Image (spheres, rainbow, N blue to C red):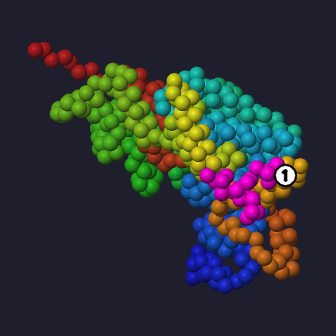
Amino acid sequence: MSLSASADNIAGENQTINDGGNMCLELALEGERLCKAGDCRAGVAFFQAAIRAGTDDLRTLSAIFSQLGNAYFYLGDYNKAMQYHSHDLTLARTMGDKLGEAKSSGNLGNTLKVMGKFDEAMICCKRHLEISRELNDKLSEGRALYNLGNVYHAKGKHIGRVGQQDPGEFPEDVKACLQQAVTYYEENLSLMRELNDTAAQGRACGNLGNTYYLLGDFKQAIKYHQERLKIAREFGDKAAERRANSNLGNSHIFLGEFETAAEHYKRTLVLAQELGDRAVEAQAYYSLGNTYTLLRDYPTAIDYHIRHLIIAQQLLDRVGEGRACWSLGNAHSAMGNHEKALYFATKHLEISKELGDPLGQATAQMNVSDLRKALGLPAGELSPDSEQLVASFAHPSPGLRRYRVRRESMEQLQLIKLTPDAKGKTPVPNSLNLNNGNTTSETKVPSHNLDHCDDEDSFFELLSRFQSERMDDQRCSLALPADNKENTAPIVNSAMPNAGEAQDDLLDLIVGMQSKRMDEQRVALPHLPGLCPPQSSAPDDGFLEMLMRCQGARLEDQRSSLPEEPPAPTSGAGTTVPDEDFFSLIMRLQSGRMEDQRATVPTTLK
């Protein structure tokens, strides 16, 4: 029987057990064990069973929500992760648990960042930072600073990706986000040095290097990546060492230091092979091939591109296969092997058509046409669309660049962000619970016109009319003596000396009646999954002992920080090719040199 099925069976049997809180905790413990063992999917099943079992202990339920949110984050289900971290935040605020509120805000901010909701993520992360500083919790403050740097870094990369600019050539709004990221990363690095947390220093240095790379400050990027490389070697972290070498290679490429870049790419290749990461190994081959093309060592470049092509075919990466064919065509053309160049250019054209890539198709069609002319072969018939693409690529215009930008931006279309301009017309998701649990479905701006006062008067008149009827129902009728029904004035006059006592009695009566109505109007704790009303009977001593033992040491560990999110797949990019900015750099550097290698076609006299 699977773990998921066994969890369901346990939860089903729990329906007949009185100590539901005990069963809830046992299921949660098993879910935590499975998640720590790496089986998050089975762990989620046990956490969900724990919620179905239910408990009236808010701290236990808060820990379950936090663990469940982290597990869904690992599994890539960010909507559910956001939902359960929102529940955790609600409970933390309800209990007045400031540290719990800080951690749940940080987890929620990280989840919103991965979902592309950067503005909402900033609100959560800043709240995390604010509470951490109030509590003077340096470790939590460091996490908050790191998270804020990540949010601004991700937002800058997201905005900058739209224009396809090279690093250092982004618009001012992108640079502002990246500079803000640098500020938070440097604060985090300073704090981690103060706390002597070397591993956290390495992470901060790596992010600082990446941010300075995007800002075009490649020397600063190299400085931080070298420090990151040193720390990774100190800890024996080969994955981090591999990333640092790859980033150093990219930075040296932009500085024109191709030989140094090649050395870092070779080290990246060795580490990828040791880690058994075939996709990263192929990326290293691709980077080395292009680097040796820039060094004009074409035989070596061809050897690396062939290795990249083989792995791309094995991994069924058609994008990477197309890039390998394009690179091989260029290298063979530079060596004068026009027949082989034509073969790879034709393969590149076929793959570009299959993938629906207009830019790749235009590039390949132009290369095929030039190579056929160089070989004395008929150029072949081109459709009007192909001729237009070739003409656009031969004489680059903003039109083709914008076409690609629009295509990629539509593929990566995000949800409408919660911005100040959009608040007046955009519903706020109820699951965020960013305002102390109070959510609004829509914010409306009242219209101010000449009839505003009349509308208010009508509203209050209507309210008074309805309330008056309810007040009449609440009034007590005075019991009048039967012989004085006809003459009420003397009775009123006789009651005047005791008016104070009558007023006190009336006030006591109103207080008694209104207190019942106020109890009915009190807002109960929001309905949350797994929250059960307190049991009338006290739990047994065994349950209390286990609860105290487990909760005392484990609650804060359960509300752990989110892991670093897995890299999101880039639209249109293959698994065996590096980032798009490197490919665009190679195209830009090689495009001018390919013009010199093309055969000149004699003009036809009419």
User: Which SS class for mark 1?
Assistant: helix
Q: Residue at x 86, y 44 (%)?
A: 135
In the picture, measured across the screen, residue 353 lies left or right of residue 583, that is: left
Nearer to the camera, 323 or 73: 73
Residue 224 visible somewhere in the drawing: no
Q: Residue at x 74, y 53 (%)?
A: 488
Q: Position of residue 466 (x, y in %)?
A: 59, 48
The amino acid type found where label 1 is placed reads Ser
Q: Position of residue 518 (x, y in %)?
A: 73, 56
Q: Position of residue 314 (x, y in %)?
A: 43, 56
545 to 529, vertically: above or below: below
21 to 190, vertically: above or below: below
584 to 93, vertically: above or below: above
Q: Which image quadrant for residue 254?
A: top right
Nearer to the camera, 440 or 545: 440
Residue 435 visible somewhere in the drawing: yes
Quarter of the picture containing the C terminus is top left
The outermost residue toward the left is 606
Does the magenta-highlighted stretch encompass residue 474? yes
Q: Residue at x 56, y 56 (%)?
A: 77
Range drawn in magenta: 469-493
Instruction: Tell me if mark 1 has few (under 14), some (14-19) or many (20+) residues whose alpha carbon lies within 10 angstroms of its own.
Output: few
Nearer to the camera, 21 or 260: 21
Q: What residue is disc 1 on?
A: 494
Quarter of the picture containing the N terminus is bottom right
Q: Residue at x 59, y 75 (%)?
A: 4
Q: Position of residue 106 (x, y in %)?
A: 71, 47
Does the magenta-highlighted stretch encompass residue 466? no
Nearer to the camera, 517 or 265: 517
